[in-house]
C-alpha cells in the first residue's frame, strides 16, 4: 500500500476510534495527527506547529498543544518525555508502551512487552499501588549504531 493511502487509512481509523468513544477528531486534530504520523521520527510541538502553519497560517502554540493533549487522551499519540516529542500510535486499545531511545542516532523504537508491563504492575502491587497506565523510556544504543 502506498504511503499516502496508508496514512489516510490511519487517519480514518483514528476518526472511527474517536467516534466510537464519543469524541470527535476535528480538522485541526486530524491535521496534527497527520503531521505526527508522517514525521520520520518523534516530533516536538514547535516542529509540528511550523509544519502546521504551511496549511493553517494562523495556527498558534495553544492550538497544537490542545490537539496533542486530545490525541494523547485518545491514545493516538504517545509523548516521549525524554525528548519532549510525540509519536503516533493508532491502535484500537490503550496500551502501556515502552520506548527504546538511541543516544547516538535518535531512533526511537516502540515496543509493547507484556512481561515488562506485568513486572511493573507486580512491583507496584507489592507497595500497594495500582498502575493505571505506564510509559517506560530506556536510553541506550540501537543495533545499527552499536555495529558501526
Image: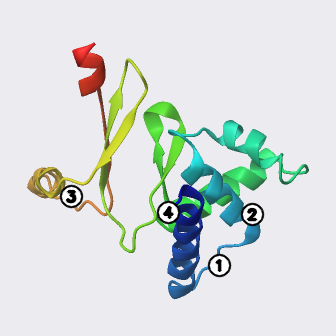
The residue mark sitting in front, 3 or 4, is 4
Q: Earlier in the sequence, mark 1 or mark 4?
A: 1
Q: Position of residue 119 (x, y in %)?
A: 11, 51
Q: Secondary structure at mark 2?
A: helix
Residue linked to disc 1: 24
Q: Label 3 vs label 4: CA separation?
A: 26 Å
Q: Residue at the location (39% across, 36% down)?
A: 108
Q: Reply above or below: 5 against 140.
A: below
Q: Earlier in the sequence, mark 2 or mark 4?
A: 2
Left or right relative to 80: residue 45: right
Residue 34 visible, this angle = yes
Q: Position of residue 100 (x, y in %)?
A: 30, 36
Q: Earlier in the sequence, mark 3 or mark 4?
A: 4
Residue linked to disc 3: 129
Q: Earlier in the sequence, mark 2 or mark 3?
A: 2
Q: Reply above or below: 61 against 75.
A: above
Q: Residue at the location (11% across, 54% down)?
A: 115
Q: Label 2 vs label 4: CA separation?
A: 14 Å
Residue linked to disc 2: 28
Q: Using a 10 Å C-alpha cutoff, classify the residue at mark 3 as few (fewer than 14 neighbours), some (14 to 19) or many (20 or more).
A: few
The residue mark sitting in front, 2 or 3, is 2
Q: Label 1 vs label 2: CA separation?
A: 11 Å
Residue 141 visible, this angle = no
Q: Residue at the location (68% across, 43% down)?
A: 48
Q: Label 2 vs label 3: CA separation?
A: 37 Å
Left or right relative to 74: residue 135: left
Q: Earlier in the sequence, mark 3 or mark 1?
A: 1
Q: Using a 10 Å C-alpha cutoff, classify the residue at mark 4 as few (fewer than 14 neighbours), some (14 to 19) or many (20 or more).
A: many
Q: Secondary structure at mark 3?
A: loop
Left or right relative to 120: residue 50: right
Residue linked to disc 4: 76
Amino acid at each position: 500500500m502506498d504511503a499516502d493511502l496508508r496514512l489516510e487509512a490511519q487517519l480514518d481509523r483514528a476518526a472511527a476510534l474517536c467516534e466510537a468513544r464519543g469524541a470527535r477528531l476535528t480538522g485541526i486534530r486530524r491535521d496534527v495527527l497527520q503531521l505526527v504520523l508522517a514525521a520520520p521520527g518523534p516530533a516536538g510541538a514547535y516542529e509540528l506547529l511550523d509544519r502546521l502553519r504551511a496549511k493553517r497560517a494562523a495556527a498558534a502554540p495553544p492550538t497544537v498543544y490542545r490537539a496533542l493533549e486530545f490525541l494523547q487522551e485518545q491514545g493516538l499519540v504517545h509523548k516521549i518525555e525524554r525528548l519532549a516529542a510525540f509519536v503516533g500510535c493508532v491502535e484500537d486499545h490503550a496500551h502501556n508502551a515502552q520506548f527504546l531511545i538511541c543516544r547516538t542516532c535518535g531512533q526511537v523504537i516502540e515496543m509493547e512487552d507484556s512481561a515488562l508491563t506485568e513486572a511493573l504492575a507486580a512491583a507496584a502491587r507489592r507497595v500497594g499501588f495500582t498502575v493505571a497506565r505506564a510509559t517506560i523510556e530506556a536510553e541506550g544504543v540501537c543495533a545499527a549504531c552499536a555495529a558501526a
